[in-house]
């Protein structure tokens, strides 16, 4: 019964028509309407969160890419709203995803480093099980929940997606994966045959709900196929809206593309850029299939699609973040300001851009409220419900701060944004101050011109740093040993303005 509208969709449409009629009557009576009307959300939407891995700010058509065509993403962006000042909570993978699922800065839950490779076999740790994930909150509210793709939040018992609020999981538990099944299966078998106990998790077979599967497609295509499957299955659950977290590992390294896609990019001479472009193109191909399935199952009209990247593009791997400075791993804008759009027919404004600062930390409370889900009273959150401000084109956080912090060997990079201003300390240089609204390229350091603004921002960041806890793991042993012997994180030195 895939072609029958779900009950929620029918209700949504009926109520939308009623609201439209009501608004039309009211419009005729209101001659001097000054406030912007917020469309009424009259049913729980399906939520499709599409995350790319290390996708550059300007590597999609809707953000100005000239050499990577992404027509399907661009169509959704054009029919929705592009968010120009969207931040993730960390400039690299694991902590960014931990923040997305928990609604908390990774530094506050000890997750400020990536889990080490093969974490299920090596350290048997993951994100604190006392942190309730957004998936669990939505599941408890009646949502049918799925994740397709990369997890990276814990691979051993207790931390598996099925134990964190997901009804369905297809993908891999580590921080990434190779893309060509013939190659990764052969490499895995070779190591297995040699008796190797721990085999790099990028080579492991994919799984579906804990059972090994024999993936035969290029992994990006396989993940798109599974997203389509999930959307089809969700359509049969008429009383349950769905939440799908589609977590592509593309275009994260290893740079591996299909031959047929590479042929489309022969004009790109740089080999890395060419392969990267083909990988992004493969994601876009999947988006078309997903949109087609949403339409075929009558769910397109009541699905909120959120598209973004987990951190900035890695320039050494072919990405661009123009006009932003630097990329993945950096506290400059290129590290954690990401491409993003929202799409939801008749609800999200079409053909608009939204230019106020939002954080991926905002999704937890925003989505929970849209879903009429109950957030546990003890749950601590660092973001806020931005929905009404987003629809009204208002700043959701006037006079409030967004932080990013990246620990390096022996020192800490940190940035804080409030309204039009951003303070930054990177690479042990002096603190800098930018008017980030006028200078998103971060070229004009205004720290000498506005020392009082810099001082206030640094002071706030220092207060925020006191809420951080020590890391519960590091991505490798050496980093952990160095951290301890060096008595990191050296916050006194970090928050001193010289
Ligand atoms: Ca990433």
Image (spheres, helix red, strand yellow):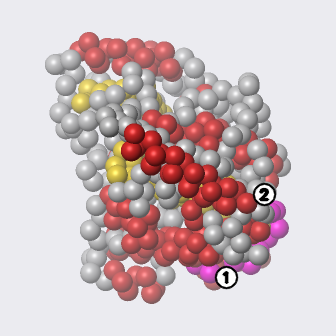
Q: Nearer the viewer, residue 437 or 152?
A: 437
Label 2: few (<14), some (14–19) or many (≥20) C-alpha neighbours in 10 Å: some
Q: Which residues are magenta?
A: 209-220
**Which quadrant does the C terminus fall into?**
top left
Q: Position of residue 170 (x, y in %)?
A: 71, 65
Query: Which residue is drawn at the image coordinates 74% and 78% (left, top)?
Result: 214
In the image: residue 404, left or right of residue 290: left
Query: Which residue is drawn at the image coordinates 34% and 71% (left, top)?
Result: 68
Q: Position of residue 287 (x, y in %)?
A: 51, 70
> Tags 2 and 1 in contact by the CB under 8 Å rule?
no
Q: Which label is found at residue 272? A: none
Please give the residue where the numbered disc 1 appears in the rendered image. Answer: 216
Q: Position of residue 461 (x, y in %)?
A: 43, 20
Question: What is the secondary structure assignment of the residue under circle 2?
Answer: loop
Query: Which residue is drawn at the image coordinates 27% and 34% (left, top)?
Result: 436
In the image: residue 245, left or right of residue 121: left
Q: Nearer the viewer, residue 389 or 247?
A: 389
Q: Is residue 429 visible?
A: no
In the image: residue 164, left or right of residue 259: right
Sooner in the amino-acid sequence: mark 2 or mark 1? 1
Displayed quadrant of residue 184: bottom right
Q: Nearer the viewer, residue 278 or 431?
A: 278
Label 1: few (<14), some (14–19) or many (≥20) C-alpha neighbours in 10 Å: few
> Would residue 424 be counted in the magenta stretch?
no
Q: Nearer the viewer, residue 458 or 14?
A: 14
User: Ligand 1: does it lie within 8 Å of the C-beta at label 2?
Assistant: no
| Numbered-mark total | 2
The vertical placement of 456 against 482, above or below, is: above
Please give the residue where the numbered disc 2 appears in the rendered image. Answer: 239
The vertical placement of 264 against 270, above or below, is: below
Numbered disc in front, either 2 or 1? 2
């Amino acid at each position: 019964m895939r072609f029958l509208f779900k009950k929620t969709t029918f209700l949504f449409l009926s109520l939308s028509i009623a609201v439209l009629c009501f608004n039309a009557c009211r419009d005729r009576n209101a001659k001097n309407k000054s406030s912007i009307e917020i469309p009424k959300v009259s049913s729980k939407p399906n939520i499709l969160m599409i995350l790319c891995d290390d996708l550059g700010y300007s590597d999609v058509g809707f953000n100005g890419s000239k050499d990577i065509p992404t027509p399907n993403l661009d169509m959704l962006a054009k029919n929705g709203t592009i968010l120009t000042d969207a931040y993730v909570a960390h400039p690299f993978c694991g902590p960014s995803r931990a923040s997305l699922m928990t609604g908390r800065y990774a530094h506050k839950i000890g997750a400020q480093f990536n889990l080490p490779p093969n974490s299920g076999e090596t350290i048997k740790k993951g994100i604190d099980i006392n942190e309730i994930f957004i998936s669990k909150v939505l599941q408890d509210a009646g949502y049918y929940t799925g994740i397709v793709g990369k997890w990276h939040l814990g691979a051993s018992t207790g931390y598996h997606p099925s134990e964190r609020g997901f009804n369905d999981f297809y993908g891999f538990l580590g921080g990434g994966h190779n893309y060509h099944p013939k190659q990764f299966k052969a490499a895995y078998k070779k190591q297995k045959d040699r008796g190797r106990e721990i085999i790099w998790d990028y080579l492991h077979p994919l799984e579906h709900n804990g059972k090994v599967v024999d993936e035969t497609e290029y992994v990006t295509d396989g993940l798109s196929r599974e997203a389509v499957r999930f959307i089809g299955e969700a359509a049969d659950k008429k009383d349950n809206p769905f939440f799908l977290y589609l977590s592509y590992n593309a275009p994260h390294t290893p740079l591996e593309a299909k031959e047929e896609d590479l042929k489309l990019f022969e004009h790109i001479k740089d080999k890395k850029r060419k392969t990267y472009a083909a990988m992004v193109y493969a994601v876009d191909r999947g988006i078309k299939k997903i949109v087609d399935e949403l339409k075929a199952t009558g769910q397109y009209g009541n699905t909120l699609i959120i598209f973004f990247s987990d951190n900035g593009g890695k320039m050494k791997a072919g990405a661009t973040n123009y006009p932003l400075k630097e990329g993945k791993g950096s506290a400059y804008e290129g590290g954690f300001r990401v491409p993003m759009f929202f799409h939801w027919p008749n609800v999200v404004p079409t053909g608009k851009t939204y230019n106020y600062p939002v954080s991926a930390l905002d999704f937890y409370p925003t989505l929970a409220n849209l879903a009429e889900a109950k957030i546990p009273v003890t749950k601590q959150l660092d973001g806020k419900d931005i929905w009404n401000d987003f629809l009204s084109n208002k700043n959701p956080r006037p006079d409030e701060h967004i932080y990013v912090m990246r620990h390096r060997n022996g020192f800490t990079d940190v940035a804080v944004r409030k309204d039009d201003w951003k303070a930054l300390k990177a690479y042990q240089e002096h603190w800098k101050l930018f008017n980030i609204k006028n200078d998103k390229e971060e070229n004009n350091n205004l720290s000498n011109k506005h020392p009082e603004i810099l001082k206030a921002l640094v002071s706030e960041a220092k207060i925020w740093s006191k809420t951080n806890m020590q890391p519960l793991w590091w991505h490798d042993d050496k980093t952990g040993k160095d951290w301890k012997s060096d008595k990191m994180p050296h916050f006194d030195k970090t928050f001193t303005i010289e």
